[in-house]
Image (cartoon, rainbow, N blue to C red):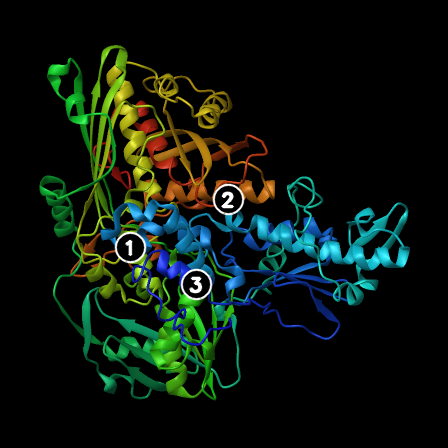
Amino acid sequence: MNDTPGIELSRRNLLIGGGVGAGLLVAWAVWPREYLPNMMLEEGEHLFGPWLKIGEDGRVTIAVPQSEMGQGSYTALAQIVAGELGADWRTVAIQPALPGPNFSNDLFVREWSAAFLPASLGTFANSGASDALHKEWAKRTGFMITAGSTSIRQFERPCRIAGAAARTVLCQAAAERWDTAWENCDTANGFVTFGKKRIPFTELVADAATYDPPSPVPLRASPVNGLSGREAVRLDVPAKVDGSANFAGDVRLPEMLYASVRAGPIGDTRLKELDREGTKGLKGLVDVVRTDGWVAALGTNWWVANKALDAMAPVFATTGRMPDSGIMNEAMERALDKGPGSRFVDIGSVDAALDKSAGTKVYRSQYSVQPALHAPIETRSATAEFKKGRLTLWLATQAPESAKLAAAKAIGIDADNVTLIQMMAGGSFGRNLDNRIAEQAAILAQHAGRPVQVIWSRPEDFIRDIVRPPAHARMTAALGKGGVVQGLAIRIAVPAMARQQIRRLKGDSPVEALKAVTGEHDPLAIDGAVPPYSIPNLSVDHFPVDLPLPTGLWRGNAHGYTAFFVESFINELAAAAGIEPLSFRMQMLVGQTRLARCLTNVAALAGWDGGVENSGKGLACHSMYGSHIAVIATARTGEQGVRVERISAVVDCGRLINPEIARQQVEGGIIFGLAQALGSATEYENGLPVARRLRDIDLPQLSDIPEIDIEFIRNEEEPGGLSELGVPAVAPAIANALFSAAGVRLRELPLLSRGL
């Protein structure tokens, strides 16, 4: 990026909210920039823009900016590029893209602008000026992030353009040999073709790299072409199956040390004392590093480092409030009782509709969710090497630029002196947005003067987790004649989790982020609470809760709990009205044809019987990120608690890039939704989570997984978000099924066995 003298703006000192408005946009307009490709070339390789390079041996290497966490982004994005290029899939490889403006995720920034901007700016967050500002900010800062189901929605078109640009110059090179117009040529399976003539890419890449693509680049007539839109072998699976895939904990460097880290309870915590005498005679222990907030043991293997921490028995002192489930529940109830709340949706006159004198019947229910842990198989891990003033990080992160800045700040170097090598992640679900591990690895590598690999133990990972927030909701509705919903008031007490998340990505510690957003409203903390139904009088209020518990994104984000509140209550209203749940929903789905079709199709798929008494079938639906899903669950109760026998789902997510990956994502989301319904949560006592091991959070085991049926409604609508879509509707569908089976309405997540 080229800076104009006199304009002092950089990715490190620009703060969104300072100088917001036309002046900043004008300043950017006169600030020249050139975003050059940053792929490294080996001998015989030729660069075709920032997204791909082609070797003279025919290998096509595609840069992928999104973290591969099992969701298939490596394959899906590569398919889009390769489809436009006309490559042979057998020759395609991927490499993680280095952080840079070419791969900034401005869609996430625009959709989450309400969390980036100060709450005081109000409606500016939803204005066109805000969109322009955040798009430009994302580019200027190189803001890369994998979150919010944005990968395909953000990068499908850039990937198509990248593949098409390479295709056109390959055609130009071939056309010159054939003495024809390049527009007469095409590509397929790694060849440029013209009639019956064809030349392999291998013979053209050197010449093609000297041509410039036309502007604008001509795309293929349909996004569904060659590879895109079809099933293709996943690029990441073979290495995962044979064990050759490398994760951050697999990195091995000469003279590397292994570190285990321990910190105290959540909050303003300081290391008070530790027993160094306890480590005497412990072979393999090399060093102990203590900071104000944590202590690390370095050893020749991780086992000895972790054993050393046990032997030292560190003692921490915490000042101020600490998370405690009882106290936090009371705080959420107080927030709902006393407010003040922020109204984000106000349609009609809810107060008038809820007035019993209006001839309606009023129904009220209260729901709650506990804090939920991410619990990916891979705990937070990182490897770091500090040499000659430069830091190299091997890390799986959903926010690589943020990780670089955090590591650089921790050891007092410039972020330009940090090289981050993006690793595949063993799951994440939002966990890898937390970059404190990068700070610790940097500090320890600088201290040791040798490479250091840091791996958090499972208890440490749970204690340090940035959890899905707890939330309480009060739902009030008025039913008129014929069971028509005349009014609905939704009041949700929940921390400003999205604002916290963005503050941390911008460099705040979890405690600093909590303090910074105290009392602020957060529309993204109640995202998904607006029902898809036509209700003449509707209000949705957020009641910010100041809890001493860092909270953030979790698979499904706020939709995971708001859908539970809404879809469970809709079933309660259907029962009160004496109307079958599917018909009750359909009569309110005005203008929601895609969601309505999902509902009718899933009813046919699952053999919907109306959810009659003792049927054990429950229905729920949801829309998010441009996609739609309807779910029917069959569930029972017994001596072993809740047993889910079958889950059927119909999905409309627009155009499919890879149908099999789409199926995997929805199926994985459904299983995650099952985990949300039956486990994944923890209570807190004295600043610490009660759960310390995977066995403590009641995750579904293989024997608990029900039969899962998934169907897609195929169309050519723009792709919607998919990786989180399967989560939200599952818990309310199961709760509704249990009401059908046992006549008991469960209003808390996870669904508790008491009372069944």
Give coordinates of residue 406: x percent, y percent: 37, 72
**Do labels 1 and 2 touch, CB within 8 Å?**
no
Give neighbour class at mark 1: few <14, some 14-19, many 20+ (Cα, 10 Å).
many
Task: Identify residue type, mark 3.
Answer: Trp
Camera-side residue of 754 and 683: 683
Q: Which mark is residue 269?
A: none
Give neighbour class at mark 2: few <14, some 14-19, many 20+ (Cα, 10 Å).
many
* Residue beneath disc 2: 665
Is 160 on the left or on the right of 99, as rendered? right
* Residue beneath disc 3: 28
Q: Residue at x 64, y 63 (%)?
A: 49
Q: Earlier in the sequence, mark 3 or mark 2?
A: 3
User: Which quadrant is the C terminus positioned in?
Assistant: top left
Q: Earlier in the sequence, mark 1 or mark 2?
A: 1
Q: Considering only vertical position in the picture, is 254 above or below 359?
A: below
Give coordinates of residue 667: x percent, y percent: 49, 41
